[in-house]
Image (cartoon, rainbow, N blue to C red):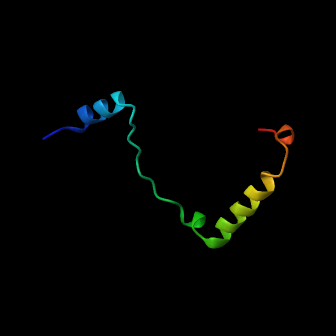
């Protein structure tokens, strides 16, 4: 048997990270939400970088 710690350590030395899986919230899956995010992204991309504030 190989424990998880040595495997993770070896992967870390190889610059490979282990990502935990997470569930996608249901509200992100609906088509109207997907369409709204696509619309928002297409509108934002038209703005000049100088006009964006983060």
Quarter of the figure with residue 33: bottom right
Q: Residue at x 84, y 48 (%)?
A: 47
Position of residue 36 measured from the top left corner of the image (x, y, whole percent) = 72, 65
Q: Is residue 10 above or below residue 39?
A: above
Residue furthest to the bottom in view is 31
Q: Residue at x 45, y 53 (%)?
A: 22
Q: Is residue 15 above or below residue 46?
A: above
Position of residue 44 measured from the top left corner of the image (x, y, whole percent) = 79, 52
Quarter of the figure with residue 9: top left
Quarter of the figure with residue 27: bottom right
Q: Residue at x 80, y 57 (%)?
A: 43
* Foreground of the two, 54 or 42: 42
Q: Is residue 43 left or right of residue 6?
A: right
* Foreground of the two, 23 or 51: 51
Position of residue 16 measured from the top left corner of the image (x, y, whole percent) = 38, 36
Q: Residue at x 53, y 61 (%)?
A: 25
Residue furthest to the top in view is 13
Quadrant containing the N terminus in the rendered view: top left
Q: How many marks?
A: 0
* Foreground of the two, 10 or 20: 10
Quadrant containing the C terminus in the rendered view: top right
Q: Is residue 5 left or right of residue 19?
A: left
């Amino acid at each position: 048997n190989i424990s998880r710690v040595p495997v993770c350590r070896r992967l870390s030395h190889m610059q490979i990270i282990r990502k935990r899986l997470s569930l996608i919230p249901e509200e992100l899956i609906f088509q109207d939400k997907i369409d709204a995010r696509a619309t928002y992204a297409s509108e934002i991309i038209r703005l000049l970088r100088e006009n964006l504030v983060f």
